[in-house]
Image (cartoon, rainbow, N blue to C red):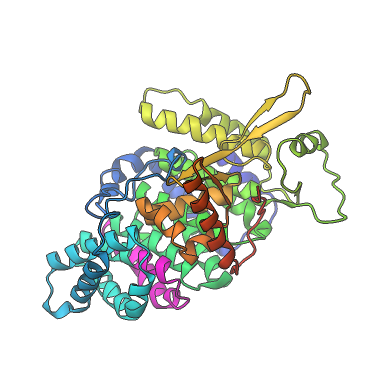
Amino acid sequence: MPDLRRQIFESGKTVSRKAASREASRTNSHASSKQTSRQSSRAASRQPSDDEDAGYLSDETAMSIGSLDDENPEQDNADWPVELAERIHELLDRKRSSVQGREEALTAFCRLTKYHFAEDVTRVFAGELLIAFCKSVRTESSVLETTQALRAIELLAITTNDDKTYENTESLLTRTIRDSTSSAVKAAAIHCLGACTVFGGAGEDGILDQMTFLLDVVASDGQSIDAPDDATTVTAALQVWGFLATEIDDFEADSEEAAQIFIDQLDSGDSSVQVAAGENLALLYEKSYTPQEDGESNEEEDSEESDEHENIDNGPKLVKRYNAYHNTPELERQLKALAHVHTKRISKRDKKSLHSNFASILNTIENPRRGPRYNTAIDQDTNRHYGSTLTVKIGKHGIMSIDRWWKWVRLTALRRILQGGFAEHYFQGNRAVLDNLPVMLRAAGRSGDRESAKKAAKMRNNHSSRRWTAPQSDDED
């Protein structure tokens, strides 16, 4: 890896003071990160998020999600609006509250707004609730109260979709990320910042600012936020960076630097860091290809791959626009090693995760037209190539095809926020969810399921006004 780094920084290019500072920080911290990141972070990453979801900052790899058919423990709770109103009253009456009381009220608020789309209730009190949640974050009376308050801000942001949320939370969240002494709080604040940026009206400039901030966290192995070699915070920064990157159409100017930073993290001693970095690399390569425009000729040298792609799916032909990274062959060698890693120092669980995830990531690096879990087969009679992509079951109502990395990254981010309530928010017409993941569902069998899928499609069409142009939106099956 040092050789690759020198190729960039000794290539004759002008290096900014910011880049030089980042490189120096990375050089000093990278060696120890490989050895200590796993030990320093694994326990802290298990801070409970609410009563039934211990470990919402889990180090489980994203590719393990094959179904969102989670059991909803709230499905028979007809009195949830009354309970939510009571909890909101408790949270707003802070003078009479205790730390334990706020922990319980915040936990209940997160549970209720996660499993129910409560926009009508929360929007009325959105401003007051945000002030109360921010106060719990600011005072940091306990780790549980603080992380639950950060979760509550995320859920409020994705429920109300208020374009003032970002400006009212950004400075507090950034300060918490830098100053908190708890790695669990830092990671929760990073995820919360991502949600507020996307759903809270940050705009493209705000998104780019936060991507730069998070890239500094990753490049310094957490040192820039006083969390040296902490895999929990580095993983959170990588995941949120990817989520924000899906909002940016043109990333050509910054792709090389970002790719080098993520490649450095492939040497981490923690599998969650490695997988998150690998997924961001796949996303960068995917973004270097865009749909061929009308009347545009495709003069790529890899015409054979292009012809193969035309036989694989019915979406628009994708054309390479720029090099996502200058040394793809070397990157492919690293990814192949991770896809076939065999060492006794890695647990069976982590080894299985690395094999599965990096086989998929490598597939995209080799041909960025291929999305997550892409597999090819050849019809022996016609010699034509066919492909299959990742599908995810959404409740009992339909199947979602995740054929692009930007869709996968967004789905993973939404799933982390809403967990078992994702299907409820999706089918109840949460505008933030439908706008963020404009993917058509296929009905899953029975007539009732088909009606639910049609209902979701109708909601999606009703909320078709988007705040951006989703890149490579080849999802209309």
Residue 155 included in the magenta stretch of the image: yes
Q: Is residue 334 above or below residue 448?
A: above
Query: Measuring 87% from the left and 49% from the top, which residue is drawn there?
Result: 297
Q: Residue 182 versus residue 401: which sits nearer the camera? A: 401
Count of numbered badges drawn on the protein = 0
- Magenta segment, principal secondary structure? helix
Residue 110 x/y as whole percent: 29, 62
The residues colored magenta run 153-182
- Which picture quadrant has residue 1? top right
| Residue 291, magenta (yes or no) | no
Query: Which residue corresponds to the image point at 52% horizontal and 61% vertical from the top-left?
Result: 434
Q: Residue furthest top?
A: 380
Percent coordinates x, y for residue 39 in the rendering:
29, 40
Q: 42 or 91: nearer the eye? A: 91
Reply above or below: 365 against 410.
above
Q: Nearer the viewer, residue 347 or 388?
A: 388
Give 44 or 28, whichever is nearer the viewer: 44
Q: Is residue 3 left or right of residue 290?
A: left
At x 27%, y 49%, the residue is 53
Q: Residue at x 29, y 44 (%)?
A: 40
Q: Is residue 264 visible?
A: no
Q: Position of residue 370 (x, y in %)?
A: 65, 40
Pick out the residue farthest to the front. 447
- Residue 416 x %, y %: 39, 52
Q: Is residue 434 left or right of residue 477?
A: left
Give the vertical position of 317 relative to 353 (above or below).
Answer: below
- Res. 121 in view: yes
